[in-house]
Amino acid sequence: MNDRIIFFTNPTLTSAGSIILNSPTVGMESSDSITLNAGNAILLTNGLVSNDGIVMNANNGITLNGDVTSASDIVLDADANGIADGSDTLTISSGVTIETTNGRVDLNSETGGIVALGALTLRATDSILVDSDLDAFGNLTINSDTDSNDGTGLFELGQVGGTVRTLNTHDNLLDIVAHEVAFTGFINTGTASTTITSSTNGTIGVGLSIGNMTIYQDELSRMTSAELILSSNGAVTVEGVTASDSQNIGKIIIDTNSGVNFTGDSSTFHLLTINNSSGINVSAVLNATDIDFSSTGNIDINSATTASGNIAFNSGGSINGSGLIHGNNLNTSSVNGTNIQTSVSSVSFNNSGIGSVLINNTGALTATGSNSGGLVDLTSNDLITVGAGGVSAGGALNMTASKGITVNGAVVAGGVTHLNADSNADGTGDFTIAVAGSLDTGNSDSFITANDLVFNGALSSGAGTITIQVSDNGTIGVGNAIGDMTIDGAELQNITSANLVLGNLLGGNVVVDGVTPTNSAGIGTVFINTGGNIDFNNNASSFNALNLTANGDINVNTDLTTVLGDFIAVADADLNLSGNFSLAGGTTLSSANDIVITAEFIDLIGNLVAGGSIGLNGNTQTSGPLIISANDGIIISQNINNNGNVLIDADADLNGVGDFELLAGILIDSQGHDISITANDFIIGGTINSGTATTSLSLSVGGTIGIGDAAGDAQISGAELQNISASNLIIGGANNDGIKVDNVSLANIANLPLVTLVASKTGKDIRFNGNASSFNNISMIAADDIKIDKGLTAQQVSLNAGDDIDLKGLSSFVNLEANAGDDIRIKGHLTVSTETDLVAGDDVTLKGHLDLGDLTINAGDDISISRHVTADTMDLTAGGKIKRHNNDKGKDNDKGKDNDKGKDNDKGKDNDKGKDNDKGKDKKPDKH
């Protein structure tokens, strides 16, 4: 059965009473425009469709139980007479849609209002006017510009100059799409949201700002809604929204694909959220309870922005601005960096690109966050606290605070890190790493300035350097020592770094006490710098390597060790002639590598022991024995004045690389005490003076010693001899392979009354080669031979050889004592003015021109004396024969004549026994 009602040819239905159109199953249809006029009420039991317009006028109400659709205007007036004389309400059933596909929709009921029993949809191409109170008990959807193309889609609530209307959704959603809106009445969605969308994606002006769609201050002030959502693809500009304008709107959300700008007069909101793709620019004062900005473009805060609660900025570009951001908690996320001024309690930041994060905060700040690609710079005029979530910077990290920095989480930096916990240097800003906190700068340097330190967590810079300075240049205590800044052993133990620098040359004194190897194990080299003094007191201290610089004194009053690297100390760094270095008596300064000390005066009462070299650059003085030991050499560059023995070992590990060097113009003076120097080689450019005591120069390992012009593995030139003053200079010992002497002059040994040459190593000898040499007095001790080939001039001469003694050339002595384990052979020209005492285990042969005083010979075998040997007296004792030869040429054969005892050359042997080399023996070749 078809119960459809169909109207034709522009029907008009007029009734003094009610009009009821009842088509319960199919609905009603009009081929042309339809007009219904009722003196009472109009009731539609189902929908009505018109191919043209629809007009309904009723004095006592209209009830719609179905959709109303037309191709032209729809005008519904449920109180046409404007008199409250009955049920004058426009009542609309739930789920009804009122729509025109080409026109406007006007809804009116002057006294009875409009009631939507459930969801209601209003749609028009040109405009929608609601000129009555509207109560919707379901979601209300309004689109006054469904064609979105001619800019005529206005939605009006009430008319300008007319009665103020109220639209109330009773906590249901309100969704408005329009080209423009005009609200002369009130809108109330309660706990639900209101959405207003620009149908043409035009601009939206809010407050005092004008746009294609404008929501004025008074319109905002008449809205009550949990949320107001403004949506468009066009730009949104906000100006001059006052607190009273927005007081009934819980949150305003601006959602656009273009920019959002806050300009001109200040604006105030409760909760403010912006989502857009073209940037957000705050150029006017902005206030809100909470602020949440999210943009794929930049966020620029160039005017004061305040939230009593939380602030969140999420940018696909950068977050920048000179405007001060006030709030409680600030959360930022960016791709290309953040540079903002803040006054917040806490900040959480994240930057995923290569830009920097710079946050300058007024007041105390708690910070967490990361920047994967660039700098993080946090500044506060109060306290900065790193929260448990930590701070991570892919690049450099800066934190500057006036009242301290506390690290409660992991702080990680990929670049140079500067942390200043006391930026105003008023002595209140400490730097603290809690137990759960840590600071790791990878292999980059870090600089920490603070009033004091508390390191309960780890601090690491890998291969980089950590520099720690006292903000007000106060004192530093290290280990058990107490200072304005104190770094105890446990705190040192939390540090891992290639280098640790403590203090600066403007700072106060530094005292170190009882740093254990475990305390300092994680630090490669500790540098201590001060404008005052550095003192090592009480308990012994140990470091891997140590570098000290002080404008004042450096005092080592207890044992001090560097277990891996150098010990370098510079006192009087400002060169004002007031900084000294002292090593107390009974203490040992020991280094696994080099020791280099530079000071105006160096007072070494204790012992120096170096696994490498030792360099002393200062006037060195002690009141007791001076013991210096190094593995790889010792360089003396300033005077040593010592009232005690001086013991120097430049090659203590016997590796053959430790030389001793005394720079030109430098003095070592033991004030009449012995000086002993052991080295691989000697470079004596300065003066060595042991006065009436002995100076000893000995080789640490095998090798020859060359004296004068003679070459050797170690060489002591004539000029170097001339730099030595001692009652006895002993050269050599049990380690060297032999000694060679060439062309030593009296000028060279002017300050050496006695020179003793020792080559006591098995099989080693002493040789005088090349040019003749002169000494005052000389003593030689050789395990093997002593050979003097080119003459020797001296007063007292003592020769002790384990094997042969050979004396050739032109020589002149006052006294000669020679003791050989085998033969003594004297050839050439020799003058001895007093006594000559020769003792040989085998033969003694005197051949040449010898003018001797008293001659005493004791030979284990033969004595052979040529014709040109004269002596005042002779006392000859031989275990074999004594032969005197009168051959003018000094030949030993004597042609078979008896010599002294009438014996015929013993066995008829040629040349003193028929032996070659004075005795015909070929015991060993001459050594050269």
Image: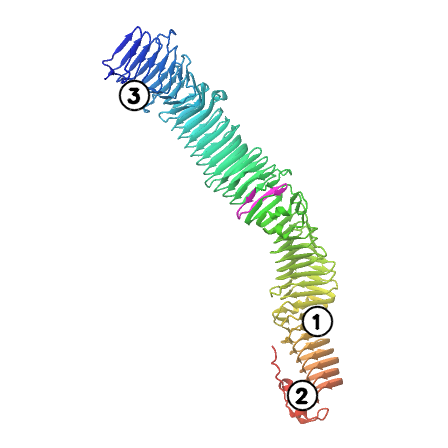
Residue 325: x %, y % from top left? 52, 31
Picture disc at residue 825: none
863 with respect to 168 (left or right): right
Picture disc at residue 101: 3
Labels 1 and 2: the sequence-earlier one: 1
Picture disc at residue 755: 1
Answer yes or no: do the residues labelled 2 and 3 have beta carbons within 8 Å? no
The Cα–Cα distance between marks 2 and 3, rounded to whole angstroms, is 152 Å
The Cα–Cα distance between marks 3 and 1, rounded to whole angstroms, is 128 Å
Image quadrant assignment for residue 71: top left
Answer yes or no: do the residues labelled 1 and 2 have beta carbons within 8 Å? no
- In the displayed structure, would residue 789 be above or below residue 480? below
Answer yes or no: do the residues labelled 3 and 1 have beta carbons within 8 Å? no
Depth check, front residue: 322 or 633: 633
Q: Amino acid at mark 1?
A: Val
859 with respect to 916 (left or right): right
Would you name the residue on which mark 2 appears? 890
